[in-house]
Amino acid sequence: MALWWLAIRPRTLSLAAVPVGVGSALAVHQGAAFDGLAFLVALACALAIQAGTNLFNDAGDFLRGNDGPTRLGPLRVTAAGLATAGQVRRAAALCFGLALVGGVFLVIHAGWPILAIGLASLAAGWAYSGGPRPLSHSAWGEVFVMLFFGLVAVAGSHFLHSGAWLVAAPLLGLLLGTPAAAVLLVNNVRDLEADRLAGRRTLAAVLGLARSRRAYALLMLAPFVLLAIVPTAGVHWPALLPSLLVAPQCVALARDFQRMPPGTAMNGQLARTARAQLLLGAALGLGLVLA
């Protein structure tokens, strides 16, 4: 069990959980009734898709020869010989299957829009790591993360409770999606030289080191610009104020990244960036529920 816990990369799971919580909190803030069972099923589906995507990525990178001895990131179970690519792929398929089963309940509960969101999320999860041109190896990876770990997840979970589509949901989704995309950008800056040598055109490889540093700062500070826009969509300022408590941490992360050399030191930066996104989501969700 410890092997599979390692394989699903638990430090990244919060990126999938946070937008589900914030979308639900937004629905409650706007007067919808909170459905605990639907929330738990949606959360389980999001975590299962994230885990499955990570597992497909683990096996796929090994089969493509990307996880060699010069790898700078955390241990990958397939490359380390702890599991075969077939075993890891079957585990990934199981995760996607569980998400599909949970999705049936959510479709019955909230209707066909949830089916479209669920199928798109499963397809995107596979496209991120699978196929001849995985999104994780392209400059579109950060866009994918911003979309599915932000806009889609928040809007979908909000609709699950409210049955409505409101402008505030994608705005808050973008607010959470930008630091989530920053997590992937740190990963790609860390692996910049290896990706260039292998011909992988990640966003970091396209931008180069200096512009990638500036892009990271933009992604980390963008949420606090968006906070000024959200009230125009019907969310009142008191609900947003707790989020400002995370601003100093995001500013510090953006500053530190400007001086950090690519390499294993960025593993810590990646974890701290994911933690900042979690704290931002927790503060935002709490503010929405209490305001």
Image (cartoon, grey):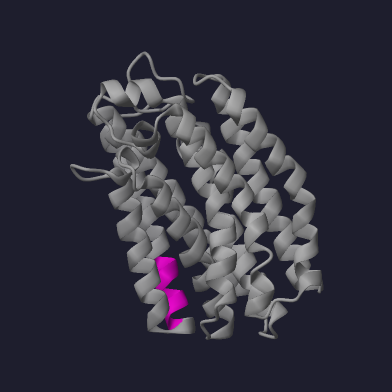
Q: Quadrant of the C terminus?
A: bottom right
State the residue in front, 98 or 141: 141
Give the image quarter of residue 138.
top left
Give the image quarter of residue 171.
bottom right
Q: Is residue 224 left or right of residue 183?
A: right
Which residue is pictured at 54% across the width and 19% down the height?
Answer: 261
Q: Is residue 55 magenta?
A: no
Q: Magenta: predominant secondary structure element?
A: helix
Q: Percent position (x, y) of residue 174?
A: 54, 61
Return the residue found at the far left: 132
Observer able to see residue 40: no
Relative to 137, residue 44 above or below? below
Q: Percent position (x, y) of residue 209?
A: 45, 27
Q: Is residue 61 left or right of residue 255?
A: left
Q: Looking at the image, how many numbered discs can be counted on the residues?
A: 0
Q: Is residue 260 left or right of residue 112?
A: right
Which residue is pictured at 69% across the width and 53% down the height?
Answer: 280
Q: Percent position (x, y) of residue 76?
A: 41, 27
Observer able to see residue 180: yes
State the residue in front, 196 or 101: 196
Image: magenta residue range:
101-108
Which residue is pictured at 71% across the width and 64% down the height?
Answer: 285
